[in-house]
Image (cartoon, rainbow, N blue to C red):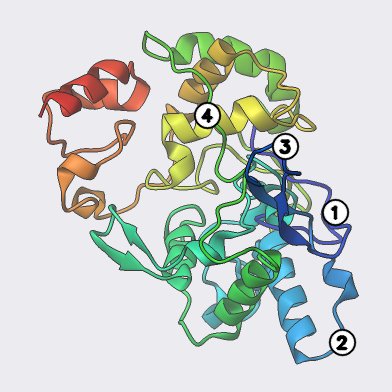
Amino acid sequence: MVHPTPLLALLCFWTVRAIAVAVIAVAAPGAGRAQQASPPVWTVPEVGALPDDAHGRLVRRGRDLITATYAHIGPEVPDPAKRYAGNNLACSNCHLEAGTKKFGLPIFGLVELFPQYSARLGAEITIEDRVNSCMARSMNGRALPLDSPEMQAFVAYIKFLSSGVPAGKALSGLGTGSMPELDRAADPVRGKAIYANACLSCHNEDGSGIRRSLPSVDLGYMVPPLWGPDSFNDGAGMARLITAANFLHFNMPHGTDYLNPQLTVEQAWDVAAYMISQPRPRKAGLDKDYPDLSKKPVDTPYGPYADGFDQQQHTYGPFGPIRAAHARK
């Protein structure tokens, strides 16, 4: 399940070890064959190696915002003007290892992919727009001003993690990975039993996680809530089954990685279905998402839709018939 890395030293949306090196490795030429370029190679940049100057401080501030979002812009910070996040999560609860874990929704290399077209908005967006989308959905809050110190720090850290990445080159490990889909609907009832065996001991029976402080949540969570009032809202990417199931398969229980999944494919789909079936904050205006409904992802759990499939199937699948119908148009 969505689980923070031990980060009070601080964490975010994504420990760091080596100086960033992103190069195009070129295969040695074989007999009579042209050289072939391999994908870019990337290692985690060392934030601590940055000098104590304005840029270094800004990047470190960005990392801290990702690993301890609740402490800087959460709903319980002393300055009401800084309460941009609407919950006490950290960005790194989803962007694992301060945004550096492969298939843990990493943020390395992203800056080179923006600006890009957003089907959800029907317009081209910047990296700042993408950050604010997370603020409004995953953090259930409000947008950061584009010229705010916090936005500048977020972007500086994201850019730093892209150090050495060639322009236009997508690194491997982005997103949440891709496992086979089921030919049936994912089953929240089966998922509840899997949750009890694999997730409950950390996330609690009610999905509320484990707080670092009581009665307030000003120190965030050792284990984040998966649903309930202090979790991500229903417009967040993690509220979509394909995103959630792949994330859980390749990252959970805590300590799992994409090389050694602990949940089977079926278990991941079903436990993700259980998680997204639970109550969470509602985001207003979701019906305005995806102006071109034909571009709406098949697992978007809210309407309207451009096809004849109901919300239940768009939420839990199977998605194959939906894709097939779209392909015939």
Mark 4–mark 3 Cα distance, whole angstroms, equals: 33 Å
Position of residue 17 in the picture relative to residue 96 (left or right): right
Dots 3, 2 in contact, CB < 8 A: no
Q: Report whether residue 312 is seen.
A: no
Marks 2/4: CA distance? 40 Å
Residue 179 versus residue 94 in the image, above or below: above
- For mark 2, does the 10 Å Cα neighbourhood hold few (<14), some (14 to 19), or many (20 or more) residues? few
The residue at the point 13 percent across, 24 percent down is 328
Circles 1 and 2: CB distance less than 8 Å?
no
Where does label 3 land, which residue? 30
- Label 4 or label 3, whichever lies nearer to me, is 3
Mark 2: secondary structure = loop
In this rendering, does residue 48 appear at all?
yes
Question: Which one is closest to the eye, mark 1 or mark 3?
Answer: 3
Residue in view at x 65 percent, y 77 percent: 78
* Residue that mark 4 sits on: 178
Q: Residue flagged by tag 3: what amino acid is it?
A: Gly
Are the residues tagged 2 and 4 within 8 Å (C-beta)? no
Dot 4, how many residues are within 10 Å of its Cα: few (below 14), some (14-19), or many (20+)? some
Using residue 237 as the reference point, say whether residue 167 is left or right of it.
right
Residue 28 in the image: x percent, y percent? 76, 44
